[in-house]
């Protein structure tokens, strides 16, 4: 809490204090750290004539102040009351501390820092101090003392500015001081000195003559020793009065980049990695792929963008910058824009594995390999925890493994350069001891460079003049706490309604997997800013330098935010399941919107039920597109459920009809059998006639029911064939019925396949189908290529298609087994391949996610035939 007394008393927003309460609190502040009795407080307000009820009124005033500003603001003692807050909460105390610090800087020959401290001290003033105590003697004395300190500070500020080489800009301010208090000789002296150092000697002497005349007219005295000595020195042009050289120009731009990486435009303030830059340049030959790796926060992006790229461009080599999260099309275009001998710089290559599916990764890597073969060089940054995955990339994995530059921690010399050189190039000075404190805090931590850079940005904001100070670094929270301090300050400035939006927004921008690895996710900014409240939160995150906005995407400034800010770290841990569901909804909604809101892209089944339960469980910060997507999916599922209920009702009616028809048929059969028995008694001819009659009755009944009750007609035809399989009439009735039984027996054609295997997706009218196509002529060891399709079994339409890896040498007819998990999420595909040396067999088992085609961990090749009798666990995580 801040208490301001350098002007009318102000203790912040809220209900104002009454005049009596303001006087009581001001009196206690004046007396601090001492105490005042209740009688002294009454005297400060009523003076010599307090009312009879003054003890109760003083107590009431104290209670109201406490209710307004907190109980701690006034402490009750054995004999009265005292001010209870930290003295630094009072602006008058801060003012005097800053003036004292400024005078110390003057004594140490640092006028720039002195001027900065004087300015900050004088900026605290809003008017006369303690106006509430104008009639109380102790208050008047304190106010007069503070005014005297302020007058001296104003004069000392002018003198400090003259010490930094400011002369012409000081003259107007010195003239204002003389006008305000023309009887202070020190002000006349400063005005004369400012004119002299501004090469205006005649004006300086005129000022001194004006001072002599004013003192004589108003006070009847001669000028003091200071003015006389100054006049003599000016007439003699004493070298001691010579103008001070102007201070070096100080850039108003911070030379550090905080959580953001240094870019090509920052090459002039990037320092400390010169040796590593040379290492990378030495390997960057035409056709080479150089990977810069290290832990998150080790400076990979800055090394490439601000260290390597500017040197390449100065040498005349064409460079094209690309970010792995920009999508497959953007990456392919980046490779196409560079000619032979040029360089493609790929930043944050680990982001390849987040937004792209395997097919897109394959196409990007193929494009990169093609350009490498043509003489284009590639430089990429990749986090060390993704190096194994990068080496396993198709087409370029081996090239990555050949040229890897690993960044280690900065040594003492490089760290000093990284701190001091940017400041020096910006015209700043680093206070002695600051680098040593930074080195102590940084230690050997490889991934703490973003923390360091952010702490230096906060130190720059707390600079004194042109000096980065140890005190400013300490106040920022240092390496350990600068990010958390900035983030908490931003979070504390949000309203109660905005804080959940900040949490949701950050969980969209960061992803933490089961291995606790945190990865940034670039998110399109359009849906985020559609809501004004979310837009305000995004602006607050950008202002705090926690999130950066680049064209049409938002991105967390660095993964270090996730671990440096404990609150966010807890969010990522606690909301991991919610974040995964939000990610599924976000991606599915984006695909639905991109397809023109096609029904085929709506969410279904268990995934939809989980998403709806998650949405309804608590208020969720969903974009308009995501809300519309879930609502459309829910409505479509209700429509399908009603259709299923209608079909079920129709099937029940048909079953009742079938039972009645079977009863009638049984009656006919009984009649026919009775008639046949009678015919047997009568003789062979009669028996034959009876059989003929039964056959005729059965076939005619079947034919008659074909159009009205196909199921009963089928049962009768089958019974007739079972009894008289050789009779042409029975066979004709049965096969005619089969060929006309479209609604009873359906066919689904699988196009473009020489062989196919299928498994039903439980609870749907879909099937997972593996289609095999032979390459070349049929032999005993043919080459086959395959894909996996999700097919509508009613229409035969291919809903989704995914490639299966590579071509395989198999027998002339592939032997496959398939299974689909009960939740419809995962398919297990198995096939027998020939061994590399011939013979049979190896079994390839692939777990494939049916919604995306992504091959899940666990796919493997097993020796010997395992057969095709297997099943999947309900969630598709393992086979048995």
Image (spheres, helix red, strand yellow):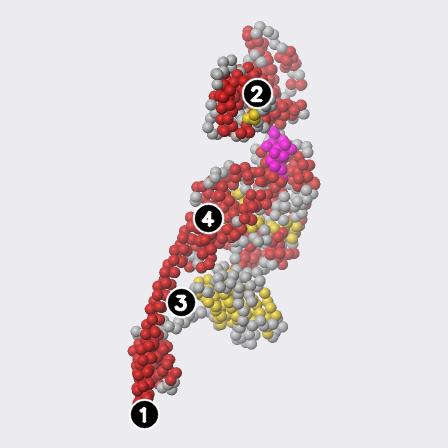
Give the numbered dot on residue 230.
Answer: none
Badge 1 element: helix
Separation of marks 4 and 3 at Cα, in angstroms = 39 Å
Q: Is residue 341 visible?
A: no
Give the numbered dot on residue 36.
Answer: 2
Q: Residues within 10 Å of mark 4 (few under 14, many from 20)?
A: few
- Which stretch appears magenta? 462-479
Give the numbered dot on residue 618.
Answer: 4
Residue 24 position within the rendered picture, expressed as x and y whole percent measured from the top left: 52, 21
Contact between marks 3 and 1 (CB within 8 A): the answer is no
Residue picked out by circle 3? 794
Q: 822 or 342, which lies in front?
A: 822
Q: Is residue 266 left or right of residue 684?
A: right
Q: 454 or 567, which lies in front?
A: 567
| Residue at the right extreme of this rendering | 412
Residue picked out by circle 1? 681
**Residue located 62% across and 12% down the image:** 227
- Of mark 2 and mark 1, the one earlier in the sequence is 2
């Amino acid at each position: 809490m801040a208490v301001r007394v350098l002007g009318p008393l102000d203790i912040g927003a809220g209900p104002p204090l009454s005049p009596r309460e303001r006087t009581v609190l001001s009196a206690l502040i004046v007396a601090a750290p001492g105490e005042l009795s209740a009688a002294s407080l009454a005297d400060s307000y009523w003076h010599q004539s307090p009312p009879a009820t003054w003890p109760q009124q003083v107590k009431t005033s104290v209670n109201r102040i406490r209710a307004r500003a907190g109980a701690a603001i006034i402490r009750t003692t054995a004999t009265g009351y005292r001010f209870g807050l930290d003295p630094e909460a009072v602006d008058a105390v801060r003012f005097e501390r800053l003036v004292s610090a400024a005078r110390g800087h003057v004594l140490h020959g640092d006028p720039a820092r002195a001027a900065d401290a004087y300015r900050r001290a004088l900026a605290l003033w809003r008017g006369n101090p303690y106006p509430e105590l104008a009639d109380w003697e102790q208050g008047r004395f304190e106010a007069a003392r503070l005014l005297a300190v302020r007058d001296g500070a104003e004069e000392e500020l002018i003198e400090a500015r003259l010490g930094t080489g400011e002369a012409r800009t000081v003259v107007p301010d010195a003239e204002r001081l003389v006008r305000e208090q023309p009887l202070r000789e020190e002000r006349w002296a400063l005005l004369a000195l400012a004119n002299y150092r501004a090469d205006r000697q005649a004006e300086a002497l005129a000022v001194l003559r004006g001072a002599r005349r004013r003192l004589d007219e108003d006070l009847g005295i001669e000028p003091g020793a200071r003015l006389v000595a100054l006049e003599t020195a000016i007439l003699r042009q004493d070298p001691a009065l010579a103008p001070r050289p102007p201070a070096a120009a100080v850039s108003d731009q911070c030379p550090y980049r905080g959580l953001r990486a240094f870019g090509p435009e920052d090459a002039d303030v990037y320092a400390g990695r010169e040796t590593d830059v040379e290492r990378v340049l030495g390997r960057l030959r035409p056709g080479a792929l150089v990977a810069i790796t290290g832990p998150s926060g080790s400076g990979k992006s800055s090394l490439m963008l601000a260290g390597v790229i500017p040197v390449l461009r100065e040498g005349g080599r064409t460079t094209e910058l690309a970010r792995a999260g920009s999508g497959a099309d953007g990456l392919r275009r980046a490779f196409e824009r560079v000619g032979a001998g040029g360089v493609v710089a790929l930043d944050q290559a680990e982001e390849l594995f987040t937004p792209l599916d395997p097919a897109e990764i394959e196409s990007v890597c193929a494009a990169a390999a093609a350009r490498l073969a043509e003489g284009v060089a590639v430089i990429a940054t990749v986090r060390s925890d993704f190096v194994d995955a990068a080496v396993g990339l198709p087409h370029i994995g081996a090239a990555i493994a050949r040229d890897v530059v690993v960044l280690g921690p900065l040594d003492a010399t490089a760290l000093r350069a990284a701190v001091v050189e940017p400041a020096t190039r910006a015209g700043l000075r680093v206070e002695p001891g600051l680098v040593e404190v930074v080195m102590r805090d940084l230690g050997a931590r490889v991934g703490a460079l973003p923390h360091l850079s952010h702490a230096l940005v906060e130190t720059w904001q707390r600079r004194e003049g042109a000096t980065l100070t140890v005190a400013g670094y300490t106040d920022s929270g240092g390496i350990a706490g600068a990010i958390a301090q900035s983030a908490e300050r931003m979070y504390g400035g949000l309203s109660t309604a905005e804080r959940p939006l900040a949490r949701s927004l950050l969980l969209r921008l960061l992803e933490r997997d089961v291995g606790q690895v945190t990865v940034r996710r670039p998110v399109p900014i359009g849906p985020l800013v559609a809501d004004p409240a979310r837009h305000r939160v995004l602006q607050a995150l950008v202002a705090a330098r926690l999130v950066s906005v680049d064209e049409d995407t938002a991105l967390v400034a660095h993964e270090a935010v996730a671990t440096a800010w404990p609150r966010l770290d807890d969010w990522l841990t606690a909301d991991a399941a919610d974040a995964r569901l939000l990610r599924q909804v976000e991606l599915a909604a984006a695909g639905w919107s991109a397809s023109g809101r096609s029904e085929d892209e709506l969410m279904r089944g268990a995934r939809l039920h989980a998403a709806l339960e998650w949405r309804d469980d608590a208020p969720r910060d969903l974009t308009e597109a995501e809300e519309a997507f879930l609502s459309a999916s829910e409505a479509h599922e209700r429509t399908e459920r009603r259709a299923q209920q209608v079909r079920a009702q129709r099937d029940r009616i048909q079953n009742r009809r079938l039972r009645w028809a079977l009863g009638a048929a049984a009656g006919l059969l009984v009649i026919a059998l009775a008639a046949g028995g009678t015919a047997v008694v009568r003789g062979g001819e009669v028996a034959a006639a009876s059989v003929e009659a039964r056959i005729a009755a059965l076939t005619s009944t079947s034919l008659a029911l074909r159009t009205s009750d196909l199921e009963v007609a089928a049962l009768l035809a089958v019974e007739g064939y079972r009894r008289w399989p050789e009779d042409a009439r029975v066979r004709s009735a049965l096969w005619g019925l089969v060929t006309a039984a479209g609604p009873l027996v359906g066919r689904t054609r699988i196009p473009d396949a020489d062989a196919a295997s299928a498994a039903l997706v439980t609870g749907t009218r879909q099937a997972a189908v593996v289609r095999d196509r032979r390459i070349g002529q049929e032999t005993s060891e043919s080459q086959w290529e395959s894909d996996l399709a999700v097919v509508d079994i009613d229409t035969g339409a291919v809903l989704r298609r995914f490639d299966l890896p590579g071509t395989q040498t198999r027998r002339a007819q592939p032997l496959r087994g398939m299974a689909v998990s009960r939740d419809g999420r995962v398919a297990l595909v198995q096939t027998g391949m020939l061994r590399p040396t011939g013979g049979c067999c190896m079994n390839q088992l692939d777990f494939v996610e049916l919604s995306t085609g992504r091959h899940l961990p666990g796919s493997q090749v097993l020796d010997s035939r395992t057969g095709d009798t297997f099943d999947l666990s309900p969630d598709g995580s393992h086979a048995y």
